[in-house]
Image (cartoon, rainbow, N blue to C red):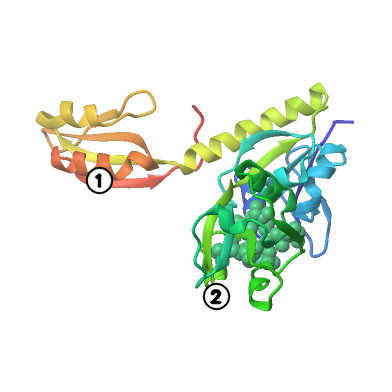
Amino acid sequence: MQQKLKIAIQKSGRLYEDSVKLLKDCGIDVKNGINKLKTEAENFPLEIYFLRDDDIPQYVEDAVADIGIVGENVLYEKKKAVTVVEELGFGKCRLSIAVKRNEDYPGVEFLQGKRIATTYPVLVERFLQEKGIRSDIHEISGSVEIAPGIGLADAIVDLVSSGSTLFMNGLKEVETVLKSQAVLIRNNQLNDEQLKLLDRLIFRIRAVKKAKNTKYVLLNAPNDKLKEIISLLPGMKSPTVLPLAEPGWSSVHSVLSENQFWDIIEQLKEAGAQGILVVPIEKMIV
Ligand SMILES: Nc1ncnc2c1ncn2[C@@H]1O[C@H](COP(=O)(O)OP(=O)(O)OP(=O)(O)O)[C@@H](O)[C@H]1O
Ligand SMILES: O=P(O)(O)OC[C@H]1O[C@H](OP(=O)(O)OP(=O)(O)O)[C@H](O)[C@@H]1O
Ligand SMILES: [Mg+2]
C-alpha cells in the first residue's frame, strides 16, 4: 500500500481557511465534512487531521501527524522537538505587551514586579529574563485583553494584528515579544518515503508562494525605446519581445516581483511604454 503523509491543520480559527486554501492551491483536494476531524485528499497521498492549534506541535513531535501547520507563537511556546520546513506567509501577527492606554510607560522597567496576564507564559518569561526583569506571570487561557480592566493584571501579553482588540479594551501596545507567521513543521524522524512526499508538497508550496509575490506584465513599446524598456525588466530569463501588427511597435512580456512592482511600472511609463497590463500568476516554477 502506498504510504500517506499525515498533516495536522487547525480545525477552525484564524489559520483554518488559509491552510485549506494553501493545500487547494497546491492542487490537493481537501473535503472537510461538517464536524469531520479527519479526511483524505483524493489526488495526493495526504491524510488531513483537523485539530486545536495548541495540540499540533505535540502531535507532530509524537508522529501522530508527520507534518503540521501552526503559528510560530504556538510552536515556540510549546517548545516541542520538531523541524520548521517552510514559512507560509499567512497568520501574520505579533505577540505584544500592552498596558492601559493612560498608563505612563517609561520602558520595560515598568514591568518589574508587576502582574502580567498571558496565554504565553514561556515566551513571556524568556523575554523578561533577557531584559533582566522579574514579573508575576498569570497564565490564563483566553480573553486576556480584559485582565487590566478587571484588576487582574497591570499588563498583558497577547497576539495583535490590526490592534483593534487592544484599542477596544482601552490598552496600548508597548513591546513586541515575537513576530509570528504560520509555518510548516515536520516530525524529526520521517522515513525516506515520507521525506519524498514532503519534498513534493514543498515544491508545490514554493511554486504557489512565488506566484503570489509575482505579476505577469504585458506592455507595448515603440521599437526605438525597446532597449531602455527591456533594461528595466528582469523577466524569468529575459523578457519576451513580439512584433505588433502596427509597424515600429513591439509587445513586451515579463514577470515582476510585488515589492519592486510600482517602482518599475513608473519607470516603464517614463521610458515610453504604453497599454501596460498586469496579470496574476497562478503557479510559478523556476
Ligand atoms: N489577529 C490575528 N491576525 C493574524 N493571525 C493571528 C491573529 N490572531 C491569531 N493569529 C494566528 O492564528 C493562530 C490561531 O489563532 P486562533 O485565534 O484561531 O487560535 P485559538 O483560538 O487558540 O484556536 P484553537 O481553537 O485552534 O485553539 C494563532 O496562534 C496565531 O498564530
Ligand atoms: O489586533 P487584532 O486584529 O484585533 O487581533 C488580535 C486578536 O486576534 C486574536 O483573537 P481572535 O480574534 O482570533 O479570537 P480568539 O480570542 O478566539 O482567539 C488574538 O487573540 C487577539 O485577541
Ligand atoms: Mg488555540
Depth check: give the residue in front, 67 or 249. Answer: 67
Residue at x 55%, y 51% (from the top left corner): 176
Label 2 beta carbon less than 8 Å to ligand 2: yes
Whether residue 274 sits left or right of residue 183 in the image: it is left
**Vertical side of 140 occupied by 261: above or below:** above
**Vertical side of 173 occupied by 42: above or below:** above
The type of residue carrying mark 1 is Ile
Query: Could you say which disc has been placed on residue 168 in the image?
Result: 2
Sequence-wise, the earlier of marks 2 and 1 is 2
Can residue 131 be seen in the rendering of this structure? yes
| Residue underneath mark 1 | 276
- Measured in 3D between alpha carbons, the distance from the residue under mark 2 to the one under mark 1, in whole angstroms, is 43 Å
Q: Are there few (<14), some (14-19), or many (20+) residues within 10 Å of tag 2? A: few
> Which quarter of the figure is the N terminus placed in?
top right
Residue at x 52%, y 61% (from the top left corner): 173
The quarter of the image that holds ligand 1 is: bottom right
Quadrant in which residue 131 is drawn: top right
Quadrant in which residue 75 is drawn: top right
Depth check: give the residue in front, 109 or 223. Answer: 109
Q: Which SS class for mark 2?
A: helix
Can residue 29 be seen in the rendering of this structure? no
